[in-house]
Amino acid sequence: MRSKLTTTCREPQKFVSFLPLLPDAPLLTCLAFLDFALHLSTNTIGPIIIAQKLLKFSPPIIKNIIFISSDSGSATNFRDFEDGFGAYAASKAALNQMLRHMAAELKRQDSDVCVLAMHPGEVMTDMAANVEVEWEVEGIISVEESVSKMLPVIESKLPKDSGTFWTWDGREHPW
């Protein structure tokens, strides 16, 4: 598979990690170990390991690694009303820290790969449709709108932007 990928890619490509998981979300006081581990495996560990594997290709096959994060993973903008989102938020915060470390390591290696976190907005996906919350979710957008707005943001970023967090509409997001 390695030789096929390296011979068919003419220029480095983008890798966008979108593996969200938000299963039945109990309060943290009731969260089972395996439920928390599932969040971390799906939302943090899996995307990082896939990115690691893609970075090993020589010549490089990617120039951008985009991790779909969430405003729930921001430590600065902690959302204390999100009962039931603790494991999800923790897994996205862990993803954010991992990708920041990945970006820093790549910069020290003089890599031109740009590693970004993206908050896609409050997107109406199957995941969102199956979650009932006790607060009003404002600004819900379609998948198409989220993607069409994220693409120019991603395209505008350079290696010097590696390790930063952005929103679908082009605003830098606080960690």
Image: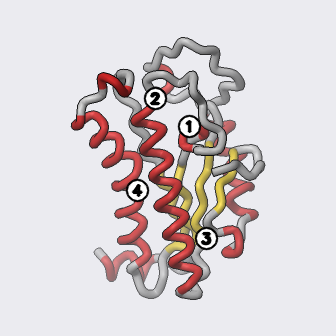
Gap between marks 2 and 1 measured at Cα: 8 Å
Residue 23 at x, y percent in the picture = 35, 28
Where does label 2 land, which residue?
A: 85
Label 2 Cα neighbours within 10 Å, binned few <14 / some 14-19 / many ≥20: many
Q: Amino acid at mark 2?
A: Phe
Gap between marks 3 and 4 measured at Cα: 15 Å
Where does label 4 land, which residue?
A: 47
Q: Amino acid at mark 4?
A: Pro
Chain-order first, disc 3 or disc 4: 4
The residue closer to the viewer here, 92 or 143, is 92
Residue 109 at x, y percent in the picture = 53, 87
In the image, which disc is placed on residue 114?
3
Label 4 Cα neighbours within 10 Å, binned few <14 / some 14-19 / many ≥20: many
Q: Amino acid at mark 3?
A: Cys
Chain-order first, disc 1 or disc 4: 4
User: Badges 2 and 1: C-beta atoms under 8 Å apart?
Assistant: yes
Where does label 1 land, which residue?
A: 72
On the rendered structure, is 142 left or right of 99? right
The residue closer to the viewer here, 130 or 161, is 161
